[in-house]
Image (spheres, rainbow, N blue to C red):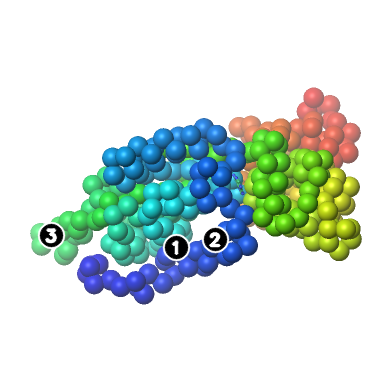
Amino acid sequence: MSSDTLKRGDLKGIVDEACQVQDQAPEIQSLRPERLAEYIGQKEVVDTLKIAIEAALLRAEPLEHVIFHGPPGLGKTTLAHIISKEMNGRLTVTSGPALEKGGDLIGILTHLEDGDILFIDEIHRLPKTVEEFLYSAMEDFAVDFVFDKGIHARSHRYRLNRFTLVGATTRVGLLSAPLRDRFGLFRNLDFYRTDDLVQIIQRSADILEVTVDDEGARSLAERSRGTPRIVNRLLKRVRDYAQVRGDGRINKALVEAALALEGVDAEGLTRLDRRYLKTIIDYYHGGPVGIEAIAATLQEEADTLVDVVEPFLLKIGMVVRTSSGRKASEIAFRHLGYAVQKKIL
Ligand code: ADE
């Protein structure tokens, strides 16, 4: 492997250009906080990062490797961008599925400079052969190449610059122990409190130059599944609605009308959330039922249901997971207007 002859162009398709373009698109980037001081919510995560970053800067060392886990839309990518800004390092963005071969990762690693940040999204989806190169890269800032086979095999160690790996995953349980153990900072991102989402809405509304009253902001926050990405997406839909059907200002009635059109109900459930719950109730008598059976009935990917749909429904107690499968709870029956079945009481 002649990694030292790799050029930037060789990284096409591996360094996630689409993702970078999307992440840096002005309208998305502009709603994202760029500094820790602007970040609302996740107080413990933010405090941990503030201390670790300040200490690393004082020692003029790179930040230790960080992993964020939790459901989509809670700020894992945003925090990677913030870390690179706070540490004054360049950010390279890629993802587990984009790195198919060891050479893909090595190409990226050998281009990193001292203090750079490498962000690997969906790190649980790294192929094993690629993951194995990360161990020495993370621990010793080196990669080992093996040339030839059998008795002719020779190993060569290639030194890397001191970088920080920021990993993100929705499935922390799928990480292997050797990878997990090499992260110095290991933080979970949980769903946001309504009060934090209200503040995020007010901040985003200021940036978008739209007026939202307190009741309107609270109503939107309560319907956003505890997720900033959803808050910001729905805020834009409500803003459109306010401009076309109202006087441009956002209040509670307007939020309710606009979100009804989006298929978002009073608990923030989407059409897919309700189809998921109704499948369990209508087809499987309220459960227990396995995720593969639900996915087959819904004609959706089981991974989408596990990563995107279930975390919030579990959090608000609409679904429970048992050793024999998923069950719809009494809260779900009532929310969807079903009579509560005896057996689940
Ligand atoms: N926009 C999206 N997430 C945010 C957060 N946590 N704080 C401030 N603005 C945000």
Q: Which amino acid does label 3 sit on?
A: Arg
Which of 120 and 299 lies nearest the eye of the viewer? 120
- Helix, strand or loop at label 1? It is helix
Q: Give the quadrant of residue 283.
A: top right
- The alpha-carbon separation of the residues under discs 2 and 3 comes to 41 Å
Position of residue 211 in the picture relative to residue 56 (left or right): right
In front: label 2 or label 3: 2
Q: In which quarter of the image is the N terminus?
A: bottom left
| Residue 21, percent from left and from top | 53, 67
The residue wearing badge 2 is: 23
Circle 3 residues within 10 Å: few <14, some 14–19, many ≥20: few
Residue visible at 84% across and 30% down in the picture: 341
| Residue 99, percent from left and from top | 40, 61
Position of residue 206 in the picture relative to residue 278 (left or right): left
| Residue 216, percent from left and from top | 81, 44
User: Can residue 297 be spotted in the picture?
Assistant: no
Q: Which amino acid does label 2 sit on?
A: Asp
Q: Up-down: is 110 above or below 180?
A: below
Circle 1 residues within 10 Å: few <14, some 14–19, many ≥20: some
Q: Give the quadrant of residue 98.
A: bottom left
User: Can residue 154 be spotted in the picture?
Assistant: yes
The residue wearing badge 3 is: 154
In front: label 1 or label 3: 1
Marks 1,3: beta carbons within 8 A: no
Disc nearer the start of the sequence (2/1): 2
| Residue 32, percent from left and from top | 58, 53
The residue wearing badge 1 is: 98
Marks 2,1: beta carbons within 8 A: no
Disc nearer the start of the sequence (1/3): 1
Q: Which amino acid does label 1 sit on?
A: Ala
